[in-house]
Amino acid sequence: MGGDQEKSIIEKFLEENVLFLGPDPEIMEDHRVVPTTPREAEALKSFADPDQINLVRHKLQTACNESFDMVEQMGAAPGAKWGDLISGVWTANGDLALASMGGVLIFSVLTQHPVKFILKYWKDDPTVGLKDGDIFMHNDARYGNIHNTDQSLLLPVFHNGELICFTGAIVHEGENGAIEPGGMPSAAESPFDEGLKMSPIKVGENYEFKRDIMTFLQNSVREPKLQLEGMKSKFFAAMRMKARVEDAIAEYGVEAVIATLRKTLTDTEIEVRRRLSTWPDGKVRTNVFADGTLRENCLIRIRLELEKKNDELIIDFRGSSPEFLNRPNNTVLASLKGMLAQEFLSFVWPDLPRNQAVFAPMTVLTDKRSTLNCSPDAPNAQSMMTFFPGFTAIQIGVPKFIYSASEKHCTDIIAGWYNMIVTFIYGGVNQYGELVGNVCADLNGMGGAARSNRDGEHSIAPIFAPMADIGEQELIEEEVPLLKVVPHKLMRDAEGFGKFRGGHGYQQIATMKDSSMWGFMCCSIGSKFPTTYGIFGGYAPGTLPLCKVKGVNVFEVMRDKRELLRYSIEEIMNERPFPGATYSTHHMGLQLEFAKPGELYMITQGGGGGYGDVLERDPTLVAKDLLDGLLSMRSVQNVYHVVLDEKTGAVDHEATQKARDAEREMRKHRGKPYKEFVKSWETPEPPRDVPFYGSWKDKSLLYRGSPDDTCPADAIVPVMMPNPKDVRIAELEAELAAIKGRS
């Protein structure tokens, strides 16, 4: 038998006997739109009138928005109720052509991956197939989406036996059976700690869920009722969209729908390329640092170089931190792309259709096995801890192109939006004796960034969803025993200072009652190093830790002493009104910690970055912020250099001008020529007393926590972190040995 024949037999055997259909790199690494197919070209020839296409597009867009509202109204998960979802229509090739105007727009460049997996592997598989009435689900981020707490449901839409498109919805369901409740386990040390790992799977036929699959999924999570209701709400929304597609076919013809979906993608990409061409060619470099893994403090570098060339944008993250093999703060490359696309969909070109073609003219470069392009071996349940800073890196860089662009379109020049999910994740037994676990929707109240012409909004919206809600505390208390003593009070001095200031974040002072077992978690970075920054002279917002008051039951103590109640974290931590209680601070990566009734857990949503020089801020705006309780006199005097009456807010403009002139003179005195500054500032390697991960000067050489531990960027050695408990035990043992040595 000849060599070619033998090779053919071996290849045929391997093709027919695949051990495991893991994530397909060809699908997962390609975020671009499939080229126009002959079928689509045929449809475009017969249905080409722009006005008619616009009518069909509006009909389908309305269907997406309508189904979005349906999921919000029917869903049981906090993420469904408060808008952490999208619904959409995909082409027959799997590309997302239209999505709901509200919701999590990250999904707009992520949801095509599982659809394309279904088309490539299941469509012609005799044991699976793809036919009218099939229902598919998926949640594993390695096949698409953000993290395993997001669940997607998809329906194929046929017309006379021809596959026309897909409809579906994606929701942050929360609870998914992970090692910690709520679906985002920061304690996960492998992908097997992250709960449900659904590759694209058929969960129903003939428009009915398979009861055996449904039971399996419910049996895999802590809240089986939530799993059932989440699946049903997404299914009915997908069915409503399917009906609207069929209405469009009945009214305009099948060619109209196929042509409209294709034309929407093509036109979007053409327009993005046209807009990019108005930006000046050149390079912009930015750096962002994560200050921890959620389990230990360290500095994790996110390095970015943006290069604009003609009508393309190259987004180069090479030189960023290596992956952490036993920490969940890693990002799948596809998830990173979805987050980066959010910058353009929400903040740069919010007038464009919500589809994946917005990101098609952009190329993303990363090092393989970096924390922004992790391997399948690394957990990624908390990918937000690296791709949110990645988003900030691009958000800080893009304005430097837009500022000099020949067209501004509908874009404001904006500083860094606050980028962390400061909220409580909870798990335990509720007041009805049911086991529950999920995340509070307070994470949706991120502080807005300052703009070139106005201040940022307070606690306005998350970076990943332009239209989402923080939830109603009274409704939350009906379902779970989590009470907010102070639900949403703005934190003083939490802004990014500047000519225009960033919006403030709010405080949450929470406790629990009426539960035999209740635990709190938090999953944010930025307690020691800011996660977002100002631009063009604006300041970054401050850092705010988790604060706790343990060993107290405020319900008992305050029964006859209501005066002990304080309305801000600052007052509680400084005045310490509860005698005998323990007051402590903690970084914002708190693993599940069981609480006792009446103990306080206190966190603060961060503020947006500032824009421009603080000395150019209108003194009357400074006075207003002081009177509104947003600023302290210390900041008024030492940051803005404004002289005013603390009680009335009346500004002494002459004294203010003198104070600001004096500060400008001090700046000149403190200033150094650039070369002299660099000489005194730069060091040949990272500091030895701070665990540092990522490149320093040379992007081809990565540090792994110590100046003595490096690896090349093209052959990354993943990082293994010690268990924080083991580290603490070693510290205590050393302390005990030292005490014994002195005795």
Image (cartoon, helix red, strand yellow):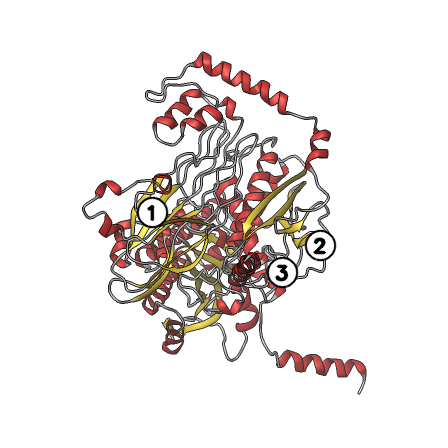
* Distance from the alpha carbon under mark 3 to that under mark 1: 36 Å
Q: Residue at x 46, y 57 (%)?
A: 89
Task: Kindly identify which residue carries mark 2.
Answer: 708
Quadrant for residue 544, please give it: top left
Helix, strand or loop under label 1: strand
With 698 as the anchor, is 364 left or right in this view?
left
Residue furthest out toward the bottom: 1
Q: Earlier in the sequence, mark 3 or mark 1?
A: 1
Amino acid bearing label 3: Val
* Distance from the alpha carbon under mark 3 to that under mark 2: 14 Å
Q: Residue at x 52, y 79 (%)?
A: 126
Along the line of sight, the residue nearer the viewer: 601 or 463: 601
Residue 269: give x, y in percent of width and height: 57, 47
Task: Kindly identify which residue carries mark 3.
Answer: 719
Q: Are the residues at dot 1 and dot 2 in contact (C-beta closer than 8 Å)?
A: no
Amino acid bearing label 1: Ile
Amino acid bearing label 2: Asp
Crowding at label 3, few (<14), some or many (≥20) Cα neighbours within 10 Å? some
Tag in front: 1 or 2: 2
The disc label shown at residue 509, or none: 1
Along the line of sight, the residue nearer the viewer: 289 or 230: 289
